[in-house]
Image (cartoon, rainbow, N blue to C red):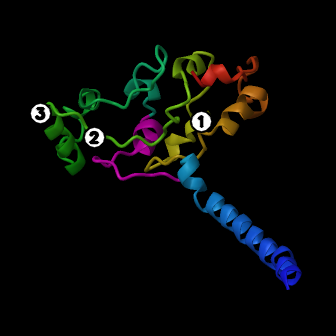
Amino acid sequence: MKKTVLDYTLKIRLPFLLFVVAVSFLLTFYISRSERDGVGYMPEQPIKYSHKLHAGDLAIDCQYCHVGVTKGRHALVPSVNICMNCHTVARKDKPEIVKLTQYYEEGKPLPWKRIHKIPEYAYFNHSVHVNVGIDCESCHGNLREMEVVEQIKPFTMTACLDCHRDPQKEIPYLEKVNKGPENCAACHR
């Protein structure tokens, strides 16, 4: 009798249990992928802002609004006073500019919702990448065509290592570019 129960457990229950565990893992892995790598993340912003208009049609350089990208680790989210450099004069009567002006006059920062975010445990320096000629679009996508910004590329270790290992494939517009570091301490500090 004991042998029959053991045989049944080994032949039927254990494989079934392993199958359920494997399927559960795979489903969880694929369903939560966008949450893990951020692809498709497109939060509603406090001010409706069109990168297509500003960076595309008006050809405003990314660095005009996202200051500090050539000097430091971070590309800063634009402050209200940068927006008001133009909007004290341009299109002041539009509803979104009226909201922007209210933030400016009250001296309040705009509560932009960050879209592109490197995990806290990883070190990334924008200036190192920008100063060797890597375009913003290489990681952030063609913002000049985006009415509403969304994350279109994953900011995962695999994505970074793909570029560091084969930069000519990932950024073919740069004729001479060195491979990036691959050692753990370069990013995990």
Q: Nearer the viewer, residue 168 or 32?
A: 32
**Quadrant of the snapshot with the N terminus:** bottom right
- The x and y percentages for residue 179 are 75, 20
The secondary structure making up most of the magenta span is loop
* Residue at the disc numbered 2: 111
Label 2 sits on a secondary structure element that is loop
Q: Which numbered dot is residue 139?
A: 1
Q: Which residues are magenta?
A: 40-58
Q: Tell me the kind of residue under disc 1.
A: Cys
Label drawn at residue 105 = 3
Instruction: Specify the quadrant that holds the C terminus.
Output: top right
- State yes or no: discs 2 and 3 in contact (Cβ < 8 Å): no
- On screen, residue 28 versus residue 61, left or right, reads right
Q: Position of residue 78 (x, y in %)?
A: 34, 30
Mark 2 or 3 closer to N-term? Answer: 3
Report helix, strand or loop for mark 1: helix
Q: Is residue 2 left or right of residue 95?
A: right
Q: Nearer the viewer, mark 2 or mark 3?
A: 2
Residue 33 lies, with reference to residue 11, above or below; the image says: above
Amino acid type at mark 3: Glu
